Amino acid sequence: MEKYIPLIGRAFLAAIFLKSGFDKITGFSGTQQFMASKGLPLTALLLVAAIILELAGGLSILLGYKARWGAIALIIFMIPATLIFHTDFADRMQVNAFMKNLAIIGGLLMVYYIGSGPISLDEQMASKRSD
């Protein structure tokens, strides 16, 4: 039963990125306007990059395929996103979002350090190489 814990943890961690990436696709113009309101340049390009990072990184974590690389990519995405969008500490919701993002970065660091776990594409590929 313990072998399923990393899979469940990866699924929970990946869910926020997959949903966020999908929401950015379906609400592209609204998200782009929000980014512009924060003073970001080249919002269309940055938004496409964010969508790609969230979906590819989320799938990497979920499937356990190159999950360490996916975790690093998502950490690199999360740091500026957190600093740009969640530093209005006078707003309680932004403080919560900032702390949530720190927790997510912590989870991603755990994936990077520990790896995908026994039920993952990484593990399947490693076992095929050793056969």
Image (cartoon, grey):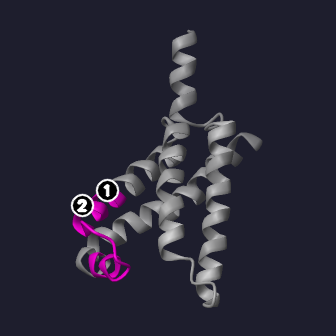
User: Which residue, as the protein is rendered here, is positioned at the far right?
Assistant: 2
Type of amino acid at the residue the image marks with label 2: Leu
> Taken as a whole, is the magenta stretch helix, strand or loop?
helix
Q: Is residue 33 magenta?
A: yes
Asked whether the beta carbons under mark 2 and mark 1 sit within 8 Å of each other, the answer is yes
Question: Would residue 31 appear left or right of 74 to someone viewing this image?
Answer: left
Magenta part of the chain: 32-51
Question: Would residue 81 appear left or right of 94 to someone viewing this image?
Answer: left
Task: Name the image quarter holding residue 18.
Answer: bottom left
Q: Is residue 61 magenta?
A: no
Task: Name the image quarter holding residue 88.
Answer: bottom right
Per the image, the residue denoted by label 1 is 49
Question: Which disc is residue 27 wearing?
Answer: none
From the image, which quarter does the C terminus lie in?
Answer: top right
State the residue in front, 34 or 108: 34
What x and y, as percent, mark residue 28?
26, 73
Task: Name the image quarter holding residue 99.
Answer: bottom right
Question: Would residue 72 appear left or right of 33 to someone viewing this image?
Answer: right
Question: Which disc is residue 45 wearing?
Answer: 2
What x and y, as percent, mark residue 59?
44, 49
- At mark 2, the secondary structure is helix
User: Which residue, as the protein is rendered here, is positioned at the far top?
Assistant: 131
Q: Residues within 10 Å of mark 1 (few under 14, many from 20)?
A: few
From the image, which quarter does the N terminus lie in?
Answer: top right
